[in-house]
Amino acid sequence: QVQLVESGGGAVQTGGSLRLSCAASRSMYSINSMGWYRQAPGNKRDLVARIMADGSSYYTNSVKGRFTISGDTAKNTVELLMNSLKPEDTGVYYCKVTINNVLTYWGEGTQVTVSS
């Protein structure tokens, strides 16, 4: 069973930066996409950013220009660089990997707290 382990969360003030990392416990093949999701208290888990196997990326509007996703399918890692953080970025961030457009793996999440 593959495990995804996130790291890099923490507490910062508005305007600060954090880098989230996600690594798989073993090699994964036929990765279609790797992404980061955020779940704020009382809310559902929403897509923040995603990178496809061809290198193309997607960002939700609220993080465009502030967050950068990068991934390495050979190393089975995905990172999210978050700059100019805002209180509304607060939440638990989960990484997700999709394989063969069928299998999905989730990490256990890492907390990000941005104070004003």
Image (cartoon, rainbow, N blue to C red):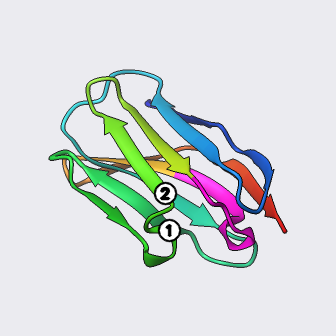
Badge 2: how crowded within 10 Å, few (<14), some, or many (20+)? many
- Report the label total: 2
Q: Is residue 57 above or below residue 103?
A: below
Residue type at mark 1 is Val
Secondary-structure class at tag 2? strand
Q: Are marks 1 and 2 in contact (CB under 8 Å)?
A: yes
Residue 115 painted magenta: no
Which residue corresponds to the image point at 49% horizontal and 57% vertical from the top-left?
67
User: x and y percent of residue 18 in the render?
Assistant: 64, 45
Q: Which residue is mark 2?
A: 67
Q: Which residue is mark 1?
A: 63
Q: Is residue 108 visible?
A: no
Q: What's the residue type where badge 2 is placed?
A: Phe
Residue 87 painted magenta? yes
Residue drawn at x 30%, y 29% is: 28
Instruction: Specify start and end residues of the magenta stretch as a single range.
Output: 83-94
Judge from the rendering whether residue 8 lies leftward or rightward of residue 66; answer left or right.
right
Q: Nearer the viewer, residue 76 or 72?
A: 72
